[in-house]
Image (tube, rainbow, N blue to C red):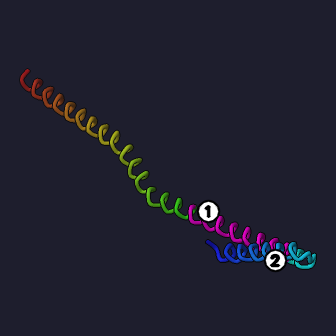
Amino acid sequence: MDKDRIAGSTKDFAGKVESTLGDIAGDAKTQTAGRAGEAAGTVQNLYGQAKDATRDATDAAASYAKDAYANSGDAFRDGSQAIAKPVQEKAGTKLQHQACFSVSLRWRCVCRKLA
């Protein structure tokens, strides 16, 4: 809670008391001063509320940014793993094809020697 909210609420309360005393006494000057104090207190209270809301929004934005930064590595790792897996599978398939091809060449060579 902001100090302006506390001070504004205090001024507002004091203005209401002064305005009520002016009503009871029938003194227009005291009533006017009390209403002016209420208005000043309300404005200061609203200003404090705006400061609190701004502070809360700033804190929330900073928190979201920290979370995004902290979790960005996870997204990068997940993406890297998603790409690496098909590449590894294709590399394994390629090695299998190369092995089969070299075996078939050897058999052809052996068969030609025998023939």
Query: What residue is disc 2 on?
Result: 18
**Snapshot quadrant of residue 86:** top left
The residue that appears at 68% across and 70% down in the rendered structure is 51
Secondary structure of the residue carrying numbered label 1: helix
- Point out which mark residue 57 bears: 1
- Tell us which disc is closer to us: 1 or 2: 2
Task: Please report the bounds of the magenta region as a residue range.
Answer: 34-60
* Percent position of residue 16, x then y: 79, 72
* Percent position of residue 42, x then y: 77, 69
- Residue type of the residue flagged with mark 2: Glu
Mark 1 or mark 2: whose residue is earlier in sequence = 2
Is 113 on the left-hand or right-hand side of 89? Answer: left
Of residues 5 and 15, which is closer to you in this image? 15
* Percent position of residue 31, x then y: 88, 74
The residue that appears at 60% across and 65% down in the rendered structure is 56
* Percent position of residue 85, x then y: 33, 42
Of residues 6 and 76, which is closer to you in this image? 6
Can you name the residue that lies furthest to the top here? 115
Q: Kindly report the distance in space between the C-alpha atoms of the residues bearing marks 1 and 2.
A: 37 Å
- Point out which mark residue 36 bears: none
Number of residues whose C-alpha sits closer than 10 Å to that of mark 2, classed few (under 14), some (14–19) or many (20 or more): many
Q: Are marks 1 and 2 in contact (CB under 8 Å)?
A: no
